[in-house]
Image (spheres, helix red, strand yellow):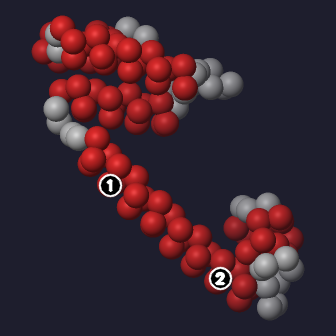
Amino acid sequence: MDITAYLGEYADQLVGRDRADLEAAFETITTRYPIGPDGDDWPTDRTEALSAAAQLAYGDSTLTEFATAWTRARATERAAMAALTGAIAYAAQTTTETDIAEATGLNRGTVRKALGK
């Protein structure tokens, strides 16, 4: 990946060790998040990872801030899943598992797991 193109007008502000570290991080990220099967070379995960690395390199954010955001997002996801589980449990009283799966976009196995089956 061309780091200069990615950084644009801010490329010259990053020199020496910081630039070398960011280049190494970009290499790791583009290996971890390669071009997708549909040819999209900027999937969301890759874009977020590249942005975070650049923010650290420029001192705009800290590792702790990213970890805190991730912890909060996980808690939010778990709360949403618990709410969905409750909704599935209620819907299952009058709706089939297949209909619940169709309505929610979940697979039937996930619906059954929510129902404790």
Q: Residue 110's spot in the image, x, y percent?
A: 77, 65
Q: Residue 22's spot in the image, x, y percent?
A: 31, 18
**Is residue 11 visible to the viewer in this orientation of the structure?**
no
Q: On the image, numbered disc 2 is attached to which residue?
A: 87
Closer to us: mark 2 or mark 1? 1
Residue at x-position 38% and y-position 21%: 25
Type of residue at label 2? Answer: Ala
Q: Residue 74's spot in the image, x, y percent?
A: 47, 60
Q: Assign a secondary structure to mark 1.
A: helix
Res 52 → quadrant: top left
Q: Assign a secondary structure to mark 2.
A: helix
Q: Are marks 2 and 1 in contact (CB under 8 Å)?
A: no
Q: Is residue 25 left or right of residue 83?
A: left
Res 19 → quadrant: top left
Mark 1 crowdedness (10 Å alpha carbons): few <14, some 14-19, many ≥20: few
Type of residue at label 1? Answer: Thr
Q: Which mark is residue 68?
A: 1
Along the line of sight, the residue nearer the viewer: 10 or 19:
19
**Is residue 88 visible to the viewer in this orientation of the structure?**
yes
Residue at x-position 25% and y-position 32%: 55
Mark 2 crowdedness (10 Å alpha carbons): few <14, some 14-19, many ≥20: few
Which callout, 2 or 1, points at the residue further toward the start of the chain? 1
Residue at x-position 74% and y-position 62%: 106
Q: CA distance from mark 2 to mark 1?
A: 29 Å
In the displayed structure, 41 sits above or below 99; it is: above
In the displayed structure, 15 sits above or below 34; it is: above
Q: Could you tell me which quadrant the C terminus lies in?
A: bottom right
In the displayed structure, 72 sits above or below 12; it is: below
